[in-house]
Amino acid sequence: MIRKACVADQFYPANAGELGNMIDAFLHLDDKDKRKERATAIVAPHAGYIYSGGVAGSVYSLVEIPENVILIGPNHTGIGERVSMMAEGAWDMPFGSVEVNEELALKLASSTPLLTVDNSAHISEHSLEVQLPFLQRLNPSVKIVPITVMAANPDECVRIGNAIAGCIEEYGHDVLIVVSSDMNHYESEESTRVKDHLAIEKVLALDSRALLETTGSNKITMCGVLPTAIAIEAALSLNAGKTRLVEYATSGEVSGDYDHVVGYAGIIIQ
């Protein structure tokens, strides 16, 4: 299966040259002294690049991008299974094709019944697609395992995270987990910043259950909260223990509309 880009010229430029110039500016590639860090997982936003590209670039510019990436994001469309993975094929992007890592995907598919091989969930879902130009710019040979999450309870997040960690350990090669998530949606700047930092605090504490409880009880509309919870559990199983917030911003800083903003956070888990 060839998965066509569905939000090129909407969320980011479809022209490779224009896209490259934009990505390079977000990544600050002229800063030769910036050291790359190894990470277990990162969290990066997935809005239109004019709004969230700076936050995404701030995270990507700091970490090593290995050849293998597990991409986990929310399912905004409601199409497909509760947790859906593409296990073969490629994604057709402006910088060229991105292959699905079939070997790693098949390991994951057989590791837990909670994860279903289902292409339909990915065809028109934007959350993973917008991460690919950053990954390709930093490692043109990158291969991905794309996973979208529509529903999962806290125990299932633990089980999926543990399964991902087990497959990474068995695979024996460097794998980065990339979570695609925006933060709170369409409230005031003041409210969004308060709510988002409640959620970010739980991510930095690597406490997936507290994250899910906090977002639920405070009505924090963090669209990738389930993917983040899964990644936290995978990272803990892989002995991660260090976290930091690299950058936080809201759409209001670009749009000038501070009454209806979306929050964006860039987080590294090591």
Image (cartoon, rainbow, N blue to C red):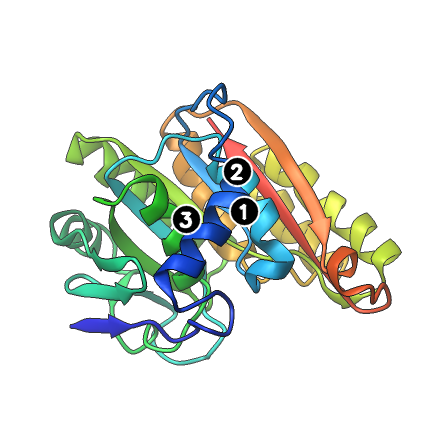
* Res. 146 image quadrant: bottom left
What amino acid does circle 2 point to? Val
Q: Nearer the viewer, residue 258 or 171?
A: 258
Label at residue 69: none
Mark 1–mark 2 contact, CB under 8 Å? yes
Q: Which residue is mark 3?
A: 134
| Mark 3 burial class by Cα count in 10 Å: few <14, some 14-19, many 20+ | many
Residue 158 appears in the picture as rendered? no
Q: Residue at x 24, y 36 (%)?
A: 168
Q: Residue at x 18, y 61 (%)?
A: 87
Residue 216 appears in the picture as rendered? yes
* Res. 259 image quadrant: bottom right
Could you say where residue 78 lies in the image, as x and y percent from the top left?
45, 79
Could you say where residue 54 lies in the image, as x and y percent from the top left?
60, 47
Could you say where residue 211 lies in the image, as x and y percent from the top left?
63, 47
Q: Which residue is mark 2?
A: 59
Pointer 3 or 1: first along the chain: 1
Q: Which residue is mark 1?
A: 56
What amino acid does circle 3 point to? Phe
Q: CA distance from mark 1 to mark 2?
A: 5 Å
**Residue 129 to residue 59: above or below:** below
Secondary structure, mark 1, is helix
Q: Nearer the viewer, residue 52 or 239?
A: 52
Side of 171 relative to 116 (left or right): left
Q: Nearer the viewer, residue 193 or 213?
A: 193
Disc 3 versus disc 2: nearer the observer: 3
The single residue placed furthest to the left in the displayed view is: 103
Q: CA distance from mark 3 to mark 2?
A: 10 Å
What amino acid does circle 1 point to? Ala
